[in-house]
Image (spheres, rainbow, N blue to C red):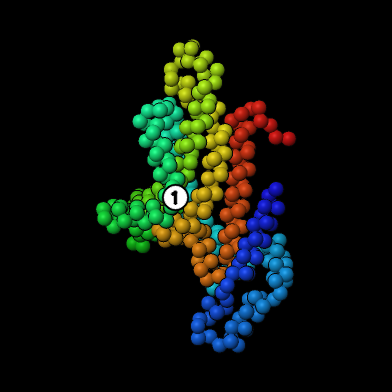
């Protein structure tokens, strides 16, 4: 299924980009460019070729590991993705950590305190979190914590005055490896607001699913048996109920990777975070087809890979599940 999915995604984005109004050559050369210079650049970029030939050329390059070159920067698209991927993965992992821990904790608490004020407040907060647009929440966080309170940076990944020895390009990890506590503190401060903004929707979704799954499991006979044996309530919940309730939760966590990737595009744009999402927005803005195709394939590949990991995790959580 992986190959058909990636082929379908790449084909759709190829057609969308080629039927979207706008001329990359005109954008590159500017409004004062002559018709002759525009046509010359279009021929150089291959834009004047028939659509089927452009499609075949794209896949010919792709099969040889070449995603093409950016129309504007002339840099290799693959190199651009590799350079920006650590920033995106650092943001996405931080947001996923917040979403998973926060969502599971809220869900368990709401299920245990069913029909109490704790349950009601948790679910209202989850509904509020699902309903908020990421870009609006990001702007509100900037307004409150950066502009009004001046606690955290407005944008970027690290202060320009702070030196960091880039070994993996994961700033938190690089700071720890090199023992640069100043860089670690500054990188962490820059990461807080984008991570919270990106984690809000997944946290709410995971919390609601965890609550629903826990309530279903806690009605089972083996939970009543465990309680009748005199086991502590924490043992019943975390050792017996939680593991059996995690299968649908893991599914939701895997699916929310897609939300994180989509949300990363908006979050990185608002916070000027130099990741793959911001690169995608820049490609769309300038109608840079190779960049848009490369970032789309990149996001799609990650989504497919994560769902494969989720399927494998099922077998660990439930021994009755086996794959042939």
Query: Which residue sits at x=56%, y=35%?
Result: 248
Q: Nearer the viewer, residue 251 or 298?
A: 251
Give the total of numbered labels.
1
Residue 106 in view: yes
Judge left or right: residue 220 versus residue 8. Answer: left
Seen at 50% across and 66% down, the residue is 282
Q: Quadrant location of the C terminus?
A: top right
Q: Is residue 221 above or below residue 110?
A: above
Q: Residue furthest top?
A: 229
CA neighbours of label 1 inside 10 A, class few (<14), some (14 to 19), many (20+)? many
Up/down of 311 relative to 216, above or below: below
Q: Secondary structure at mark 1?
A: helix
**At x 39% / y 39%, what residue is drawn?**
124
- List x then y, in percent, for residue 74: 57, 72
Q: Residue 125, percent across and down? A: 39, 40
Pick whichever, 180 or 62, lies toward us. 62
Residue 83 screen position, x and y as percent = 52, 60
Asked whether 323 or 180 is in front, the reply is 323
Q: Which residue is mark 1?
A: 198
Percent of width and height locating residue 209: 50, 36
Up the image or down, 267 lies above or below 36; here it is above
């Amino acid at each position: 299924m992986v190959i058909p999915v990636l082929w379908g995604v790449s084909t759709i984005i190829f057609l969308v980009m080629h039927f979207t109004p706008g001329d990359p050559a005109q954008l590159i050369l500017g409004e004062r460019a002559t018709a002759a210079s525009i046509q010359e650049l279009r021929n150089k970029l291959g834009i004047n070729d028939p659509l089927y030939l452009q499609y075949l050329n794209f896949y010919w390059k792709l099969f040889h590991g070449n995603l093409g070159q950016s129309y504007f920067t002339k840099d290799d698209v693959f190199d651009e993705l590799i350079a920006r991927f650590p920033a995106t993965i650092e943001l996405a992992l931080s947001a996923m950590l917040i979403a998973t821990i926060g969502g599971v904790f809220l869900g368990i608490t709401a299920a245990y305190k069913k029909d109490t004020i704790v349950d009601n407040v948790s679910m209202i907060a989850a509904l509020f979190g699902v309903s908020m647009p990421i870009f609006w929440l990001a702007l509100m966080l900037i307004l409150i914590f950066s502009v009004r309170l001046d606690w955290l940076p407005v944008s970027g990944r690290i202060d320009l005055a702070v030196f960091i020895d880039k070994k993996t390009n994961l700033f938190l990890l690089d700071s720890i490896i090199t023992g640069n506590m100043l860089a670690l503190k500054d990188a962490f401060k820059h990461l807080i607001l984008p991570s919270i903004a990106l984690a809000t929707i997944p946290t709410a979704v995971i919390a609601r699913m965890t609550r629903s799954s826990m309530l279903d499991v806690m009605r089972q006979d083996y939970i009543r048996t465990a309680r009748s044996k005199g086991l502590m309530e924490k043992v019943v919940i975390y050792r017996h109920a939680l593991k059996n309730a995690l299968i649908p939760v893991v599914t939701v966590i895997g699916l929310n990777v897609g939300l994180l990737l989509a949300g990363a595009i908006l979050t990185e744009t608002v916070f000027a975070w130099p990741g793959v999402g911001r690169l995608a927005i820049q490609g769309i803005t300038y109608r840079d087809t190779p960049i848009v195709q490369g970032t789309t394939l990149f996001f799609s590949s990650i989504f497919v890979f994560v769902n494969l990991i989720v399927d494998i995790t099922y077998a660990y959580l439930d021994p009755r599940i086996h794959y042939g």
